[in-house]
Image (cartoon, helix red, strand yellow):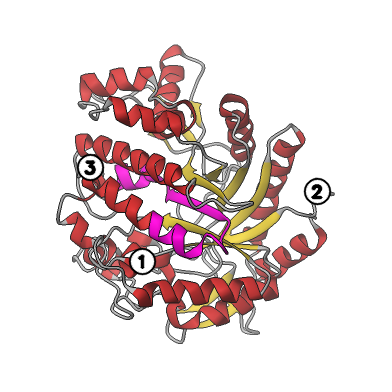
Amino acid sequence: MTDTSFPTDFLWGTATAAYQIEGAVTEGGRGESIWDRFSHTPGMVYQNQNGDLACDHYHRYREDIRLMKAIGLRSYRFSTAWSRIFPAGSGKINPPGLDFYQRLIDELLAAGIVPMITLYHWDLPQSLQDKGGWKNRDTVKYFTDYAGTMFDRFCDRVHLWITHNEPWVVSFLGHDSGLHAPGIQDRKSALEVSHNLLLSHAYAALLFGEYRRAASNIGITLNIAPAYPNSDSPEDEQAARYYDGYQNRWFLDPVFTGRYPEDMLEVYQKQFNAPLVEAEDLNAFQKSRIDFLGVNYYMRKLVCRPEDKGELFTELRPNYPGVQFTDMDWEVYADGLYTLLTRIQRDYDPPVIYVTENGIACSDRVDDDGQIRDEARIAYLRDHFSAAHRAMQEGVKLKGYYVWSLIDNFEWAYGVSKRFGIVYVDYKTQARTLKSSAHWYREVIGNSGF
């Protein structure tokens, strides 16, 4: 598309997460999180790296906000570290933790940047993990208390709230494959965790009504991957249906319909012992409402009938002429964003959608003249912005787009080996440099399109 225009009030932003950028893990009364413990466990993170320093955002947030303003960002999505607010996960509040986020929010507002807070981006206080973590239903109450503390302190200035980021990752990468903290490998645990995460979202959303101010909105962010069958065979079509149930409908349905998809409940009951769902849980699902859905999109999934009879599907690596992959070895497939946005609007009709994450890891390097020419990132973003624009033209209620990420950061189990930022970080000096994509994004924002 040669002329792609977005509404003038469209929220263009970037996104980050606390553990990935803040550092200062022992400062200001912060308690240990599961990612502190996980990253310090030998062999769990690339080259045994950790987020102790990360991008030192805790000390450099003013500098980072100046960069946001230079890029022209209209909004900034960030997460708050639960263990900065409640070092033990519950009980006594830590005032210095609240004060840090107070300063961050005030600085953003002074720069004319709309803050969007994510309450949970994977960094559960370790003390709660020691009590069973998200498998323990008591954690639902602890999260609701934490959410209420944040609403009470910041609802007068923050009007965009997200309860959870990507509960699928917390559930299945954290408790099934064990690739993320807390590193558990048990499918039944993953299902129990997924239910408690969704339940805590519902209770927090209900509680939000007590603190709601004019223009205040709450939602949840889900990582949704459209599933494509490898062929038109009934077996591959069913495999794609199961994948959609596993990653997408298992989380979308409770949020929008108040119940789990029947086909997945039946499968999980037979194969993995589905989580215990109490009547009061479904009541909370059905009573809670969201004002928007956050969508994180990075790739589609190509699947076929399972090779292992004990599984529901087999994931395939796309192999066709011209296929491109990111530095994460993820297929570049912009049309998947159009597909999922139109599908979500058609099937679930959320009041508003934000793309809360989308971006690409590239092997960025600093040229001799000091420039970082990440042309592949610009092409990626242009194609995905175009796909989003096409979806909007067909009635999708998309109101904002947050590029992942503002700055290069600690990329979870990959350490600092993957660069997603539109701002380059020299981890030895912590110096920040705008990449070519940041300059391009500034023009997109200024022109409301390209």
| Residue at the spot of label 3 | 137
Q: Nearer the viewer, residue 104 or 333?
A: 104
Q: Which residues are magenta?
A: 148-173
| Residue at the spot of label 2 | 4
At label 3, which amino acid type do we have?
A: Arg
Separation of residues labelled 2 and 1 (CA atoms): 36 Å
Badge 1 crowding class, 10 Å Cα cut-off, few under 14, some 14 to 19, many 20 or more, is: many
Pair 2/1: label in front: 2
Which quarter of the image is occupied by the N terminus? top right
- Say which residue appears at 35% left-offset and 50% top-offset: 144
Q: Confirm whether the magenta stretch covers residue 170.
A: yes
Name the spot of residue 18 as percent of width and height, x first. Answer: 41, 66
Badge 2 crowding class, 10 Å Cα cut-off, few under 14, some 14 to 19, many 20 or more, is: some
Pair 2/3: label in front: 3
Q: Are marks 1 and 3 in contact (CB under 8 Å)?
A: no
Q: Secondary structure at mark 1?
A: loop
Q: Quadrant of residue 12?
A: bottom right
